[in-house]
Image (cartoon, grey):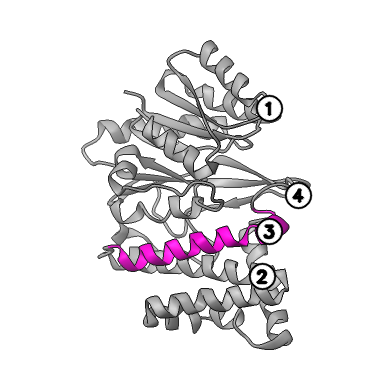
Amino acid sequence: MKILTFCVPCFNSENYMKHCLDTLLHGGEDVEIVIVDDGSSDDTGKIADEYEKNHPGIVRSIHQENGGHGEAVNTGLRNASGMYFKVVDSDDWVDLEAYEKVLGALREAILGNDVLDMMVCNFVYEKQGAKKKKVMTYRFALPENEIITWNDVRRFHKGQYLLMHSVIFRTKVLKDSGMELPAHTFYVDNLFVFEPLPFVRTLYYLNVNFYRYFIGRADQSVNESVMIGRIDQQIKVNRMMIDFFLGASIPNRKLRSYMRSYLEIITIVSSIMLIRAGTDEALEKKAELWKYLKEKDFWLYVRLRNGVLGNAVNLPGKPGRKISIGVYKVIHWFVGFN
């Protein structure tokens, strides 16, 4: 059995996917690379087939009608045979030195006595034009180089969250969770690192800068103008996260606190993007989002609404919106999401 399955969702990725795939191939026979051509109209599918032909037993090329990033991840998971599963977007790549350490740690976990459900590594924002690369690390929140439970997790600070770039799940955990990402919807990566968490019992933090997250293309989903244009999809994901959090069994106190904090930051980002849109319709959608939360669970609404960030994005009038934009700039500086 393969140690690790990489799912590489591709849509019109001909200009950059080769670099991504070439870095993943350094895992050799220990890995499986599932390329999901999500209805591309360029040479993406042809390139995927060439890699499968040139690397039999390692690369698999799957073609499907366009279903969006989430459906491509669903397809990759359905076809995964590795013990562990990681999504690598086609414009990103992995660091080769860190890659060897990741495979070594996973190999040890498989041979050990304790089952490992999720590995966490650092990732680097490869922001176009930036002189200094921002690194998202977890060394203050997670003990290093040991299998732990949620009870051993220390405090995550604001702006420090487990993103798709930083996690490697045990494949069975993802399948057992029943996660099914919605088709034709952006920002589903937030669901990917949210819904499986109650099924994660054990974690391992490897303090290496494994994932290189390219950011800065004008058409990227995290570009601010693109996010505003697709705000209805952000709201859809936000509401799905609210519903999941309220309906899931999350007995561990630390995990519940972490998930509530992550839900808070996603709701704040949604609110700020609606404020940045600057239209009456957008402001009405912001009010509806908070109303939705209030009607679903009053006490969760109070907790999120009365937090520092919740208060900041709900201040009335133009002066309040100016303060909200200031909050946005702080979050942008810490998180660097666009």
Position of 215 with respect to 187 (left or right) is: right
Residue that badge 1 annotates:
42
2 vs 4, front mark: 2
Residue that badge 4 annotates:
130
Position of 1 with respect to 212 (left or right) is: left
**Residue extending furthest left?**
113
Residue that badge 2 annotates:
328
Earlier sequence position, callout 2 versus callout 4: 4
Look at 48% across and 41% down and name the residue there: 71
Q: Are marks 1 and 2 in contact (CB under 8 Å)?
A: no
Q: Quadrant of the C terminus?
A: bottom right
4 vs 3, front mark: 3
Earlier sequence position, callout 2 versus callout 3: 3
Q: Determine whether 33 is above or below 310 in the image.
A: above
* Magenta highlight range: 222-248
49 or 256, nearer to the observer: 49
Residue that badge 3 annotates:
229
- Give the Cα distance between marks 1 and 2: 36 Å
Q: Is residue 210 visible?
A: yes
Q: Determine whether 307 is above or below 48 in the image.
A: below
Crowding at dot 2, Cα within 10 Å, few <14 / some 14-19 / many 20+, comes out as many
| Secondary structure, magenta segment, majority class | helix
Position of 46 with respect to 103 (left or right) is: right
